Amino acid sequence: MPYFIIVLGTAGSGKTSLTSMLHTYLVSHQLDAAIVNLDPAVEELPYDPDIDVRDYVDARDVMRRRGLGPNGALIASIDMLLANIQEIQDLVWSMKANYILIDTPGQMELFAFRDTGSIVLKSIVGDAKAVALYLIDSTYASRSSNIFSALLLAASTHARLGYPQVNVLTKVDLLSEEAMGKLTGLLDDPDTLSVEIASEKQASLVWDEEEISSILEKLLVFDIVPVSNTLGEGFDSLYAAIQRVLAGGEDYF
Ligand code: GTP
């Protein structure tokens, strides 16, 4: 049975780049890996997908024919995919790869908040083991309240899909050493992080420091792995985190 790696995250967080780099990483370690592109709106891909939903539905075409905007067309496209879901599942399962990477659309509300994205994923993955990689752009995580929002969204995605999850900090090559040190330090120190979050007005309007601290305790249960998709850094740690979820830590190299 294949292992599924589902790559999720907000628009521009690095899903396509990470899918491409992780595929290269797995293949360079002699592991069979295949890619499913689930984004009907993507124009160019840095990888050659083994299965591409654009062969079934093209969001640009849906936009033109139905007179919809980009968001509406994407939502309609994913709804339309359900009509072909059995064929897509059969194709995916015929691939015989050890790892099947699923690259998802930028409008992650499709997968984190609406039924259809979750139904599409569950139909494809079936009863195989799967891990969700939730990508957080580390340049966005420069303020503590942004880290808090990103972790809440990551938890919300997990609550929706129910797959074991690894949170991945992308684009760490764009952070200075000092900024990176501060970010990882805060993620390792929920007490300081909650003090900082509480000192920023948005969160403290609703929660006090103690409440934020107890929420953070729950939000930080998933591994958080820093990577650079452009430099290919952090992928040994990412692979280790994936293996801890999928194979109880067993290494296939
Ligand atoms: P959507 O599908 O549009 O939501 O985007 P995405 O999440 O697939 O992100 P994508 O991989 O297209 O990356 C968005 C931009 O960020 C591109 O210009 C990438 O080259 C850049 N990028 C992605 N990952 C990294 C990274 O680790 N470091 C740097 N420096 N740039 C990155």
Image (spheres, helix red, strand yellow):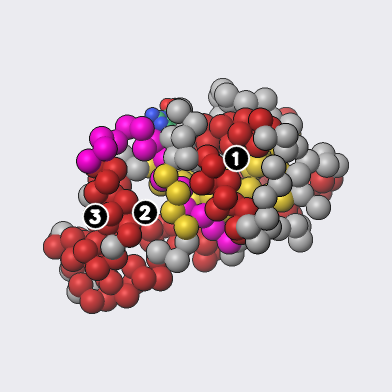
Quadrant, the C terminus: top right
Q: What element carries label 2?
A: helix
Q: Indicate the secondary structure of the residue bearing disc 3.
A: helix
Q: What stretch is highlighted in magenta?
A: 164-178
What kind of element bears circle 1? Answer: strand
Residue 174, x across and y down, in percent: 32, 32
Side (left or right) of 24 relative to 148: right
Ligand 1 lies under 8 Å from the Cβ of mark 1:
yes
Q: Which amino acid does label 2 sit on?
A: Ala
> Is the residue under label 2 in contact with that under label 1 (CB below 8 Å)?
no
Question: Looking at the picture, which amino acid does disc 1 mark?
Answer: Asp
Q: Which residue is drawn at 65% across and 42% down?
A: 101
Q: Which residue is denoted by mark 1 in the rendering?
A: 103
Q: Which residue is drawn at 52% across and 62% down?
A: 158
Expressed as whole percent of the image width and height from the top left, the position of residue 108 reads: 50, 48
Q: In this view, does 184 lie above or below 14?
A: below
The Cα atoms of the two marked residues, 3 and 2, are separated by: 10 Å
Q: Earlier in the sequence, mark 3 or mark 1?
A: 1
Asked if residue 173 lies in the magenta stretch, the reply is yes
Q: Does label 1 or label 2 sit earlier along the sequence?
A: 1
Find out whether the residues at labels 3 and 1 contact each other: C-beta distance under 8 Å.
Answer: no
Q: Name the residue under label 2.
A: 150
